[in-house]
């Protein structure tokens, strides 16, 4: 039997979000409109953000047409590409409203029903703002080479068969009838790519022949609709001959395990070149807390009751970043690590898995003037000491990526994703573990780098002193590695004191703050 031109998995899973009628239409046509996936409030907020990003306002028509450069071929004086132009694509990927759309449970549910798995990546895609054609603004009557006709975002040439099963999507943020430039697709093309391609002859695998335009249909939808289509379908926006701009946001998800969607090649990644960087979405159970553990590094989140975790909760993270990385003051991201796998750790569970790991344990407050007492022991022995009444051993600054064997670093998946994210911003990240019983104290000190403290279990009290108060804190000379320690008793009543840092609550501590 000849190899099929397109991968389309045979469904064996129950539907949780879509109806049987919707799935049947998807199988037949290769596209689907799911109404009311995004709330009117979020649609309006996202549209407002896009208007602001492109420098337009709803009541000033001339502002719609200010950006006239081609985002693909033109270059600004500073060497960068334009953020918006007549093709309509908006180079905005990380606004909190876009991340709210990516985290919407029904969006995930629809993609999960179509792929047959809840383990999905979400792409960091872009937005769209297409002003209506107007003779007074001729540049906006030509959307450019890419969007003038239909196109593919994946390779469809016969040398690349079978074409993977990849799904693209767009959210209509406002009502989008055909005259406003709704999406166009060639329906059912996944059923006949093989026959059509052999009859057509030599062709490019990404440039769609003009002959297919006559077969394209409009895919209109109301505000809040999620429009999905198979990447193998020739597609593209249509002309906006309406009275207002078309405003929308792209969103797509891809399976973590791509083998069955790519024709069985386990080494082939399922991707779409134009869809942005993927971020992990996965299952993660609810954490229960008893003991005190703290782990330094970033932020993550899962909304209560949902069967998935978006590793970086952008709306909270962006607020924390703007308040913390963009300022000189600490910030808290409450509840953001609630579903991290590291929040399931207990001394017992860690000892069961890494019991033979040799660790260095502190006895007493090592930051104050005087002799530091430490002892080396297996992690299992340290866990037994924690369970002993009246014992206050303290495991401090254990480098997890060094200590944990590579094959056992699954507990760090959210933290490693955060490290990648912070690296994009030019920030180097290391991940360390602190663990101790009630009564353990880290002496007052400051670090020369910024920190993120994530409380995995229990409660930790953090006292913070701004740099301008260091002269009154009895700084000692115990360490000379950039960290400066103090002899002051931090549990006396002091200003800048933050009580009760609770489980799953990351705290950003700016470099230079005593804590």
Image (cartoon, grey):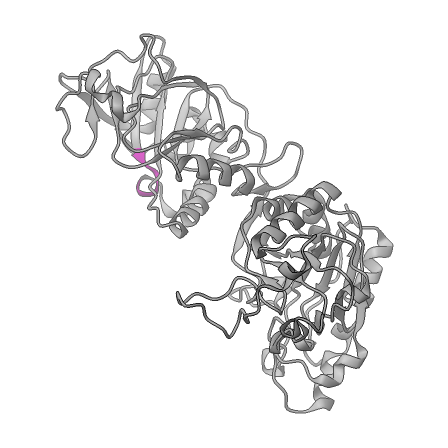
Is 485 placed left or right of 428 in the picture?
left
Q: Residue 162 location, x and y as percent?
A: 64, 74
Query: In the displayed structure, would residue 78 be above or below residue 123?
Result: below
Q: Is residue 256 visible?
A: no
Is 160 placed left or right of 298 in the picture?
right
Start and end of the magenta stretch? 398-402
Q: Residue at coordinates 65% horizontally, 39% vertically from top-left?
A: 307
Q: Residue 514 location, x and y as percent?
A: 28, 24
**Which part of the image, by quadrant, shows the C terminus?**
top left
* 339 magenta-colored: no
Q: Nearer the viewer, residue 252 or 48?
A: 48
Q: Residue 380 location, x and y as percent?
A: 35, 26
Q: Is residue 342 visible?
A: yes
Q: Residue at coordinates 42% horizontally, 50% vertically from top-left?
A: 420
Q: Residue at coordinates 39% horizontally, 65% vertically from top-left?
A: 78
Is 223 placed left or right of 450 in the picture?
right
**Which part of the image, by quadrant, shows the N terminus?**
bottom right
Q: Nearer the viewer, residue 405 or 115?
A: 115
Q: Residue 73 location, x and y as percent?
A: 51, 75
Query: In the displayed structure, would residue 442 be above or below residue 494?
Result: below
The quarter of the picture where residue 463 lies is top left
How many discs mark residues in the rendered view? 0
Q: Nearer the viewer, residue 272 or 357?
A: 272
Query: In the displayed structure, would residue 51 be above or below residue 331?
Result: below
């Amino acid at each position: 039997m000849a190899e099929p031109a397109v991968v389309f998995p045979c469904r064996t899973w129950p539907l949780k979000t879509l109806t049987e009628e919707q799935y049947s239409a998807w199988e037949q046509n290769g596209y689907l409109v799911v109404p009311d996936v995004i709330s009117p409030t979020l649609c309006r907020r996202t549209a407002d953000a896009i208007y602001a990003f492109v420098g337009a306002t709803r009541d000033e028509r001339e502002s719609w047409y200010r950006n006239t450069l081609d985002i693909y071929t033109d270059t600004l004086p500073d060497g960068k590409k334009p953020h918006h132009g007549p093709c309509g694509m908006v180079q905005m990927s990380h606004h909190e409203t876009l991340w709210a759309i990516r985290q919407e449970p029904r969006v995930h549910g629809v993609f999960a029903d179509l792929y047959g798995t809840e383990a999905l990546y979400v792409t960091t895609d872009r937005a769209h703002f297409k002003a209506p054609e107007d003779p007074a603004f001729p540049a906006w009557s030509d959307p450019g080479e890419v969007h003038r006709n239909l196109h593919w975002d994946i390779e469809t040439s016969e040398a690349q068969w079978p074409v993977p099963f990849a799904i693209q999507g767009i959210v209509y943020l406002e009502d989008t009838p055909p005259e406003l430039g709704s999406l166009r697709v060639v329906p059912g093309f996944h059923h006949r790519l093989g026959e059509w391609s052999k009859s057509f002859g030599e062709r490019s695998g990404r440039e769609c022949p003009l002959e297919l335009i006559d077969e394209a249909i409009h895919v209109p939808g109301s505000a809040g609709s999620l429009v999905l289509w198979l990447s193998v379908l020739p597609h593209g926006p249509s002309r906006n001959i309406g009275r207002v701009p078309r405003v929308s946001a792209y969103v797509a998800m891809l399976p973590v395990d791509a083998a069955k969607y790519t024709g069985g090649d386990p080494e082939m990644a399922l991707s779409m070149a134009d869809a942005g960087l993927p971020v992990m979405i996965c299952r993660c159970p609810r954490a229960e807390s008893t003991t005190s553990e703290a782990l330094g590094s970033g932020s993550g989140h899962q909304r209560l009751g949902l069967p998935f975790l978006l590793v970086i909760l952008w709306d909270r993270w962006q607020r924390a970043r703007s308040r913390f990385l963009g300022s000189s003051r600490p910030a808290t991201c409450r509840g953001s690590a609630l579903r991290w796998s590291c929040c399931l750790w207990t001394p017992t569970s860690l000892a069961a898995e890494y019991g033979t790991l040799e660790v260095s344990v502190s006895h007493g407050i090592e930051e104050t003037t005087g002799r530091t007492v430490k002892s080396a022991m297996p992690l299992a022995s340290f866990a037994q000491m924690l369970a002993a009444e009246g014992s206050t051993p303290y495991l401090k600054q254990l480098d997890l990526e060094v200590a944990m064997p590579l094959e056992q670093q699954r507990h760090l998946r959210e933290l490693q994703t955060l490290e990648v994210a912070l690296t994009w911003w030019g920030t180097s990240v290391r991940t360390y573990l602190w663990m101790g019983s009630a009564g353990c104290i880290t002496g007052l000190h400051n670090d020369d780098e910024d920190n993120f403290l994530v409380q995995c279990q229990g409660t930790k009290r953090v006292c913070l002193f701004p740099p301008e108060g260091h002269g009154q804190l009895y700084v000692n000379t115990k360490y000379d590695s950039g960290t400066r320690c103090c002899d002051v008793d931090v549990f006396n009543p002091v200003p800048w004191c933050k009580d009760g840092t609770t489980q799953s609550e990351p705290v950003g501590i700016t470099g230079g703050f005593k804590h």
